[in-house]
Image (cartoon, rainbow, N blue to C red):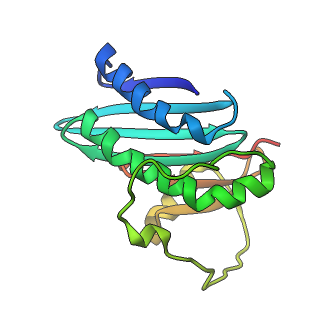
Amino acid sequence: MKFDIYAKNYEVSEKLKNVTEQKLAKLDKYFKDDETTAKVSFKKQANSFTTEIMLDFNGKFVRATATSDNFYDNIDIILPKIEGQIRKHRTKFDQHNKNAAFADAAIYDVRNAEENAKRQIVKKKNFVLTPMTVKEAEEEMELLGHSFYVFLEAKTNTVQVLYRRDDGDLGLIEPQV
């Protein structure tokens, strides 16, 4: 597994890097080759420490985030979440990729039964996309009180998604064709 470690408002120590890599290395047994990338982001804001881990395996993503009073606890919180997602997606990944990814038994005990609940589509919406700028989409999203907004970007004529992140900032999803 390859590691990309990023930090915002914090200098990552060698000890934290080593602990992170050691704990994530336990997930190596789920992946057949070294094409898996773990992107780890450490972000410090005032007295809170946020850690985000995203695993990229052949274009498939597994992501989890945790916030607490230190980064070491965050890693211990995130690993069961990541493994729960791996188990949840094990069949889907195996069928699509025809490989041995996620074939082994679980390492971490996941106690969150809600995460394993089956979900279904209960509502479907259709709407007309009107061309607008990102700023206009942000204003529309605020007016509607939604956490995301789908719109047709006026300059590029592509469908984009503007969303509110857990930290209160905004994110923009732009398709690559």
Image position of 142 with respect to 14: above or below: below
Decide which of 42, 60 is in the foreground and name it.
Answer: 60
**Residue at figure coordinates x 56%, y 48% from the top left:** 62
Choose top left, top right, bottom left or bottom right for residue 14: top left
In this rendering, would 129 be left or right of 22? right
In this rendering, would 97 be left or right of 174? right
Image position of 21 with respect to 100: above or below: above
Residue 86, horizontal then vertical, whole percent: 56, 52
Q: Residue furthest front?
A: 105
Decide which of 30, 177 is in the foreground and name it.
Answer: 30
Query: Quadrant of the image for the C terminus?
Result: top right
Choose top left, top right, bottom left or bottom right for residue 75: top left
In this rendering, would 95 be left or right of 18? right
Residue 115, horizontal then vertical, whole percent: 45, 67
Q: How many marks?
A: 0
Query: Quadrant of the image for the N terminus?
Result: top right
**Residue at figure coordinates x 27%, y 34% from the top left:** 71
Q: Residue furthest top?
A: 14
**Residue at figure coordinates x 48%, y 57% from the top left:** 84
Residue 145, horizontal then vertical, whole percent: 43, 69
Decide which of 3, 138 is in the foreground and name it.
Answer: 3
**Residue at figure coordinates x 67%, y 80% from the top left:** 125
Decide which of 77, 172 is in the foreground and name it.
Answer: 77
Image position of 33 with respect to 69: above or below: above
In this rendering, would 37 be left or right of 78? right
Residue 23, horizontal then vertical, whole percent: 40, 33
